[in-house]
Amino acid sequence: MMKILIYGAGVIGSLYAALLSENKDNDVAVYARGKRLDELRINGLRYSKNGEVHTADIEVVEAVKNDDIFDYIFLTVRENQLYKALEELRNNTSGTIVTMVNSLDDYKKWEDICGSGRIIPGFPGAGGSIDNGILNAGLTPAIVQPTTFGEISGERTIRITELADLFRRSRIPYQIVSDMHLWQLCHLAMVVPIADAYYESKEPEKAGTDSTLMSKTAEKICRNMKWLKKHKGKLSPGKFYIFLILPKHLIKIGLAFAFKSKFGDVFMYRHSMKAPDEMRELHRQFYGYIKERS
């Protein structure tokens, strides 16, 4: 039996809790607080799947005791909540924390807080919303972005193999990368301009229909990827080389299509509009990183 804690009960945490709990070999607990904690205690973790509402087989907790031992703790909080969460987990004796967080932080800062060797940097491949207490979310298509993770060292360790097996048995597409920091840089090189486009638009839900805005977004992404290739030597994943190869007018067309699609609504628009503070902070981090090294 794999014992798992999902630390954070927003969209991402709730979705992974639901998916992991469907595998009866997993014992899943969800840490929540505030209104979400009350909601989960009263109604359980309800989620929509194939047109029906299900209730996940999970335990809801409001505290994580130091001697509560989990095989994996998945940290599914926003970037601006990360440090507080790591502080709260400092004295818990579980060996592995998978940080499903968008950030350009030096991972050593995280280990300085919660202990050396505990962190596996990761990133979710999911999106959606919680509507009237019911989770309406899904995994990103694997060809676009599976759940991504890797050791800070880049090594293929036993726990990385076991984590991959956990995702496989729970039918969660995944990929293991050797350099999570580079992967997150490349990811932000794309998603920061996308979020910026929504914030710059007078009608964010119609941003994809603004030809000038799509051209500007394509230009930003291409420029970011070009800088990363020059200064880091490569891009990760390799599919991002498309931004260096394709003409910008074709990238613009592809972006406009994505912005106007159901995919764009679920995985791009909803998160950008619900987490503007987080995305603006990531904008500051990303372009600050480039400025310091240019």
Image (cartoon, rainbow, N blue to C red):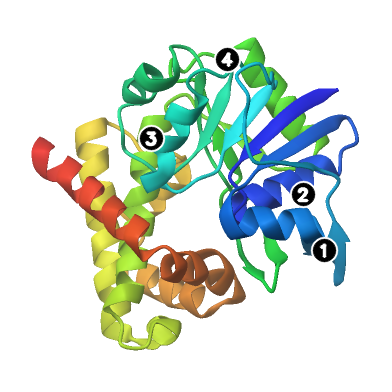
Sooner in the amino-acid sequence: mark 1 or mark 4: 1
Residue 80 appears at what percent x and percent y?
36, 47
Circles 4 and 3: CB atoms closer than 8 Å: no
> Which quarter of the figure has residue 107?
top left
Which comes sooner in the sequence, label 4 or label 3? 3
Pointers 1 and 4 in contact (C-beta within 8 Å):
no
- Residue 279 lies, with reference to residue 269, above or below; the image says above
Q: Earlier in the sequence, mark 3 or mark 1?
A: 1
- Cβ atoms at labels 1 and 2 below 8 Å apart: yes
Q: Between tags 3 and 1, which lies in front?
A: 3
* Residue 18 marker: 2
Residue 51, placed above or below residue 58: below
State the residue position of label 3.
83
Q: Position of residue 157 (x, y in %)?
A: 59, 12
- Which amino acid type corresponds to the residue marked 4 in the rendered image? Arg
Identified by mark 2, the residue type is Ala
83 or 292: which is nearer to us?
83
- Per the image, the residue denoted by label 1 is 49
Q: Nearer the viewer, mark 4 or mark 2?
A: 2
- Residue 216: image location, x then y, percent: 24, 72
The residue depicted at 56 percent of the width and 49 percent of the height is 145
**Which of the marked residues, 4 or 2, is nearer the chain's N terminus?**
2
Rounded to the nearest angstrom, the CA distance separating label 2 from label 3 is: 25 Å
- Between 240 and 91, which is closer to the camera in this rendering? 91
Residue at the location (57% across, 54% down)? 34
Classify mark 3: residues with Cα within 10 Å, few (<14), some (14-19) or many (20+). Answer: some
Q: Which residue is mark 4?
A: 156
**Rounded to the nearest whole Å, what is the CA distance between mark 4 and mark 3?**
27 Å
Q: Amino acid at mark 3?
A: Tyr
Above or below for 116 versus 292: above
